[in-house]
Amino acid sequence: MAKFIIEGGHKLSGAIEVGGAKNAAIKIIPAALLSEEPITITNLPQIEDIERCLEIVQDLGGSVSRTDTTCQIHIPAIKTNQINPELANKMRASVMFVGPLLARTGEVKFPHPGGCVLGAGTRPIDFFLDGWQAMGATVTIEANNYHLQAKELKGCEYFFPAVSVTGTESLMMTAVLAKGTTILKNCAMEPEITALADYLVSQGANITGSGSPTMTIVGVDKLSAGTYDIIPDRIEAGTLAILAAATNSNLKITNCLPNHIEALLDIFKKIKVPFVVGPDWLEIKTHQGLAPHNIKTHEYPGFPTDLQSPYTVLMTQANGSSIIHETIYDRRLLFTDMLTQMGANIIMCDPHRVVVNGPTPLAGHKLTSPDLRAGISMVIAGLMAEGQTEIDNIYQIDRGYANIDGRLRQLGAKITRAE
């Protein structure tokens, strides 16, 4: 199994480009099932989760032609309506194929989606199941599989008990081919949802209200397919900005949309991280010391849960105490145990809150990446630490950050990939 070996304590410099948004890409690929026509996807990130999504497409009978960051998908006919359990077990996003398959064929069999320690079997899919049932599907649980059937999907009114990004996107994609009008309430408002809705509308869907808490979808008989240019990854942009601040480096982050990470940039002002914003770039300047600041994760446009782990690492260098309150994922704070092994002073109050006391020097250590966002946080910690850090299970990092070691080396990082 591959691992990263990092020699920490070096400042970085230069420019680094942000790739296409993972959380947009893993939704547009399943959306290709909604049309019999070929779709061309550009700015596609070269990450492991995308490879798994494309493997599912091929397993369902679709053709995939890819060159670097451009991909064409064509699914004129569905070969099977069963999602391969082996592929589904590798990623939570496999559930995103269910809605489009149900809308296209009227029947789907699939296992509970897998993924990392945050995405695997413990995370329920109740919102999905309830929404599909509200549209007229019957749900049967057979052994370890769900079996959905619907002679005809019908529009409905559905209120999400809690805000769900994937739930919003999945029911939106299901509803575009349903008969009648669907009204979704308490929707998520992430930029990736708006981007997906805009594309579907451009291909004949009737969707209004995307990016707001209430979305209305009037079903249509057929969708076309065209070209979808994936928006820049706001989580990668925010992670790189935190990496720059954590290593006290001057970095320019290009091909990004700074207005998508305003929650983080507002906090940067408060913790005294200087930066300059351009229309599609962000430059982080060196600082004279960090102030502590509490955060509470929240759905967009609040502070993203996917930036909580990197921010926790950053606060180990702040002059004082910061409370980190994770409201989205129960187990996302468990990675802080690895930071304490590196010398951080972190007190866990309960599964949702920790107190980070700083500044504390970090020392290199042997670590294992438990999930995607904690994994990249371990990379940041390793770059900050004195001495050598080894990070195992870097497949979790490769799931969301393309060639991260090579890109960081171009900035002066001492990081290598080894078997």
Image: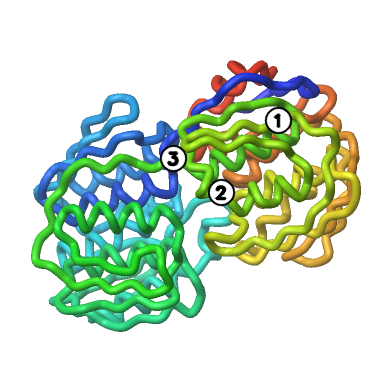
Three-letter code, disc 1: Lys
Q: Which dot, 1 or 3, sits closer to the camera?
A: 1
Residue 399 visible in rendering = no
Q: In this view, does 401 lie above or below 92?
A: above
Q: In this view, does 34 lie above or below 216?
A: above
Q: Position of residue 86 (x, y in %)?
A: 38, 48
Which disc number belongs to residue 232? 3
Work out whether residue 358 or residue 35 is closer to the camera in this orientation and state it.
358
Q: Is residue 208 above or below residue 416?
A: below
Three-letter code, disc 3: Pro
The answer to whether residue 66 is left or right of residue 407 is left
Residue 147 visible in rendering = yes
Q: Which of marks 1 and 3 is nearer the N terminus?
A: 3
Circle 3 crowding by C-alpha within 10 Å: few under 14, some 14–19, many from 20: many
Image coloring type: rainbow
Q: Earlier in the sequence, mark 2 or mark 3?
A: 3
Tell me the residue at 90%/39% (across/down).
360
Identify the residue under disc 1.
285
The answer to whether residue 61 is left or right of residue 390 is left
Circle 2 crowding by C-alpha within 10 Å: few under 14, some 14–19, many from 20: many
User: Which corner quadrant holds the C terminus?
Assistant: top right
Circle 2 SS class: helix
Mark-to-mark CA distance, 1 and 3: 22 Å
Mark-to-mark CA distance, 2 and 1: 17 Å
Q: Where is residue 418 in the image (x, y as percent from the top left)?
A: 61, 20
Identify the residue under disc 2.
261
Kindly check if marks 2 and 1 are in contact, taking CB atoms under 8 A apart as contact. no
Work out whether residue 39 or residue 419 is closer to the camera in this orientation and state it.
39
Q: Where is residue 224 in the image (x, y as percent from the top left)?
A: 12, 52
Tell me the residue at 30%/75% (across/down).
132
Q: Which dot, 2 or 1, sits closer to the camera?
A: 1
